[in-house]
Image: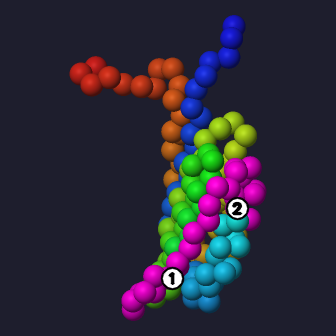
Amino acid sequence: MPAVDRVVGKHVYGSLYDIPRDIAGDEDYLRSLVLDAVKASGATLLDLRSWRVPGPKGGVSVIAVVLESHIALHTWVEYNYATLDVYTCGDHTDPWKAWNVIVSGLKPKYYTVHFSDRSQLPGTVHRLGDE
């Protein structure tokens, strides 16, 4: 039987709490951490952008656009908090490896994590009106 062409999408996302302030506000460190995560996941980096978020709450955002989708990290220094979103497509990528690299590097006291299978597989698509 011939191989079926399909989309394989894996999405890992969550929130990280009680991150050390010096880590949450260090743009260079966070960029390096996201680059390490891209490599660990097996994804192909297309672009990496980062910026400091102005204002009293402060923070840093780092976005890696990968051929297979993206990694987005946002920190809030004032709250010692971050959100992380890792979405990759393809059998050759592993978003859990990227997630683990970043969580390890951010050193939260605790975190939440969610997984969504975003693959396009037979039987997973619903048509309007078929509820």
Q: Residue 67, relative to residue 112: is it above or below? A: above
Number of dots carrying numbers: 2
User: Which numbered disc covers residue 25?
Assistant: none
Q: Can you give x and y, in whole percent of width and height, for residue 51 in the image?
A: 52, 78
**In this picture, residue 81 sits left or right of residue 56:** right
Disc 1 versus disc 2: distance between alpha carbons?
Answer: 20 Å
Residue depicted at 74% across the width and 65% down the height: 36
Residue mark closest to the camera, 1 vs 2: 1
Instruction: Categorize mark 1 by other alpha carbons within 10 Å: few (<14), some (14-19), many (20+).
Output: some
Q: Please, what is the three-letter code of the amino acid marked with disc 2?
A: Ala
Q: Which residues are magenta?
A: 36-60
Expressed as whole percent of the image width and height from the top left, the position of residue 39 reads 75, 57
Residue at the image point whose x is 59% and y is 35% from the top: 8
Residue 4, x across and y down, in percent: 62, 18
Q: Position of residue 118 (x, y in %)?
A: 51, 39
Looking at the rendered image, the quarter that the N terminus falls into is top right
Kind of residue indicated by mark 1: Arg
**As drawn, 57 above or below 68:** below
Q: Among all residues in the image, which is located at the extreme top?
A: 1
Q: What SS does tag 2 mark?
A: helix
Say which residue label 1 marks: 52
Residue 116 within the magenta-colored segment of the rendering: no
Identify whether 45 is placed above or below 20.
Answer: above
Q: Is residue 54 visible?
A: yes
Tell me which corner region of the image, top left, top right, bottom left or bottom right, holds residue 18: bottom right
Quadrant of the drawing holding the C terminus: top left
Choose between 99 and 49: the one closer to the eye. 49
Disc 2 designates what residue? 37
Q: Is residue 12 above or below residue 63?
A: above
Q: Is residue 53 magenta?
A: yes
| Mark 1 vs 2, N-terminal side | 2
Mark 2: few, some, or many residues within 10 Å (few <14, many ≥20)? many
